[in-house]
Amino acid sequence: MDPEPIQISDYDVTWPRLFDGFADAVRAHLGTLVQRVEHIGSTAVPGLPAKAIIDLDVVVESHADLPLAIARLTGMGYAHEGELGISGRHAFVWPPGEPRHHLYLLTKNAKELHRHIAFRDALRGDRELRDRYGVLKRELASSYAADRAAYTLGKSKFIESVLGRA
């Protein structure tokens, strides 16, 4: 059970600016280690309802860059949580005092990076698909507001069906 209930908000036009602020700070601290920073997740899809939490994929060239990137992110106040069961994706807890957001560190060839981008781009490119996903998210949040694992599992079949055709 997650202590915070799942709350889905209508799309907020300020989400891209919040992402830009987080991404700019990461780029400033990681310097040339960063290849790019991708806005992923539901807040990256205009018009899609979402939990009001920005998701960032910070991309580095190779596995050799990970230790220094992890050190620099922890120097910014991020807490490294490891891969959390998803190979090649390093998760971080946001710094104390910062707005809640999710940061993931991946290499440019990481399978999970390509999945994140493919799903985001599919939703951005198909309004009907985006709207169906929005309805599903609201239904799941209503049914499983206090159970993040069940909410996530409920979205998985839809996500996999989209990625299977992407």
Image (cartoon, rainbow, N blue to C red):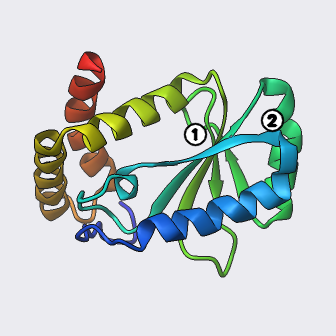
What residue is rendered at 27% in x and 70% in y?
7
Which residue position holds label 1? Answer: 84
Q: Quadrant of residue 87?
A: top right
Q: Is residue 45 above or below residue 64?
A: below
Using a 10 Å C-alpha cutoff, classify the residue at mark 1 as few (fewer than 14 neighbours), some (14 to 19) or many (20 or more): few
Q: Is residue 103 above or below residue 36?
A: below
What residue is rendered at 39% in x and 30% in y?
118
Q: 142 or 2, which lies in front? A: 142
Whole-percent x and y of residue 90? 65, 40
Figure label count:
2
What residue is rendered at 63% in x and 77% in y?
98
Using a 10 Å C-alpha cutoff, classify the residue at mark 2 as few (fewer than 14 neighbours), some (14 to 19) or many (20 or more): some
Q: 123 or 65, which lies in front? A: 123
User: Which residue of the protein is positioned furthest toward the bottom in this rendering?
Assistant: 97
- Residue 66, label in figure: 2
Q: Indicate the amino acid at tag 2.
A: Leu
User: Which residue of the protein is positioned furthest toward the top in this rendering?
Assistant: 164
Q: Indicate the amino acid at tag 1.
A: Leu
What residue is rendered at 43% in x and 28% in y?
115
Q: Is residue 92 visible?
A: yes
Quadrant location, the C terminus: top left
Q: Is residue 78 visible?
A: no
- Is 17 left, or right, of 141 in this rendering? right
